[in-house]
Amino acid sequence: MAVDSSQVAHVETEPGELPRTMAAWVIREERQGEPTDAFQIEEIEVPEPGAFEVIVRVMAAGVNFNNVWAALGEPVSVFRYHPDENHHIGGSDASGVVWKVGPGVTRWKPGDEVVIHCNQASYEDPEVHGLDPLAAPSQRIWGYETSWGSFAQFCKVQAQQLLPKPAHLAWEEAAAYGLTYFTAYRMLIDRCRLQAGHRVLIWGAAGGLGVFATQLCALTGADAVGVVSSEEKGQLIRQLGAVDYINRSEFAGMMRRGDESVDEERARFKESRRFCKAVEAILGEPPDIVFEHVGKATFPTSVLVVRPFGKVVICGATSGYQLDFDVRYLWMRQKEIVGSHFANAWEATKANQLIEESKVRPVLWQTMGFEKVGEAHQLLRDNLHLGKIAILVGATEEGQGKTAEGPGAIRAEVGA
């Protein structure tokens, strides 16, 4: 059935009552491929909330690279994660209004304005109740490893995923920070115990993760140097509080491909050494922490540049997840590699409070209409984006939803 995407902001029911169907951008296994092909708008039945679940009317959604992977079916198909459902509704960031609550939900009620963090786990897993939900065997990233994400008029979430929407942010601004910001918060604040006086190297400092890592360093009193791809992006991260920046194009030879000859590897190592000296010249000493998410291309340099007893914290590998590096610089200098994955509800809550206090601000490049979900993901796929993209769903234009004074998102042309 054809769906009129221009009507997605209109909902016929009041909070507490769900309509029968909704418009949603759906990926199906048989059409996985380029995002503009894989994402198709469909009319889908609105799910009912189960125990401890909530249905949220989506006002705006955030675009992340994870649903480029979902579209492509790489590195694995998302249908491997939820085999009982023949559709995938992506979207791991959202702001919206609680519309209906399931049995057992007492903290939230219809009409509450919320943002959503994307960590899900079973209430029955013991790890949730004393260790960390991220250690639970049921742990999934909502809107990627689960369906019913934010690219629809309504989404289904666990009640523990809800956070108060910062009143001074518009809907699109509130939808633009959760996944990347909460990930950076756990990496630096909890996994690395970031504190005043630390020296930090941030790869991709003007990207979705890096802009928040830079702000957290400035807020904490740590000195950060960011690696960026242009002078304009360098000026942005200075604005966000970095001590200085390094343009990676000046050190292109240090990027690891993995198929170097002996002579090429020697040349690459020499470039990495030169990069280390540039970092030390800015920070005064080698960094205590290296903020990693690039992976294959940068990881050998990360292990080399971090100081003895320092930490390389990594949450992803956009250039490839098969890593090789000279391990002598790890063991002989007693460095640490720290893995980190998203955040738990407590970390998301503490991080969100900093947004509410305007101590950390979202960074938003562009807001698009609901009809452009596939196009937005294709921009990410083709590396033609310049920063975070938000999608209007229930909101009809930018600026709606702001109910208090305060600085909104930083508007800048940023990228990885």
Image (tube, rainbow, N blue to C red):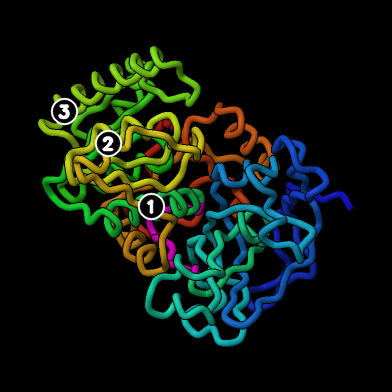
Question: Taking 373 as reference, is 4 left or right?
Answer: right
Please provide the residue range marked out in magenta: 161-171
Measured Cα–Cα span from mark 2 to mark 3 = 21 Å
Q: On residue 280, which mark appears?
A: 3
Please name the amino acid that badge 2 sits on: Arg
Q: Please say whether residue 413 is visible from this viewpoint.
A: no
Instruction: Measuring from the top left, give residue 33's x and y in whole percent.
Output: 74, 38
- Tell me whether circle 2 and circle 3 mark residues in contact (CB < 8 Å): no
Quarter of the image for residue 410 reads top left
Question: Label 1: which residue?
Answer: 339
Label 2 or label 3, whichever comes before in sequence order: 3
Question: Label 2: which residue?
Answer: 328
Q: Please say whether residue 132 is visible from this viewpoint.
A: yes
Q: Quadrant of the C terminus?
A: top left
Label 1 or label 3, whichever comes before in sequence order: 3
Q: Nearer the viewer, residue 301 or 185?
A: 301
Q: Residue at the location (30% across, 26% down)? A: 234
10 Å crowding of disc 3: few (<14), some (14-19), many (20+): some
Q: Residue at the location (12% across, 33% down)? A: 285
Q: Nearer the viewer, residue 133 or 25?
A: 133
Instruction: Measuring from the top left, give residue 329's x and y in whole percent.
Output: 25, 36
Q: Residue furthest right?
A: 1
293 in magenta: no
Secondary structure at numbered mark 3: helix
Instruction: Measuring from the top left, give residue 82's x and y in whole percent.
Output: 70, 62
Secondary structure at numbered mark 1: strand
Question: Taking 350 as reference, is 174 left or right?
Answer: right
Please tell me whether residue 15 is drawn above or below residue 263 in the rendered image: below
Please name the amino acid that badge 1 sits on: Gly
Q: Nearer the viewer, residue 257 or 182?
A: 257
Quarter of the image for residue 134 reads bottom left
Please name the amino acid that badge 3 sits on: Glu
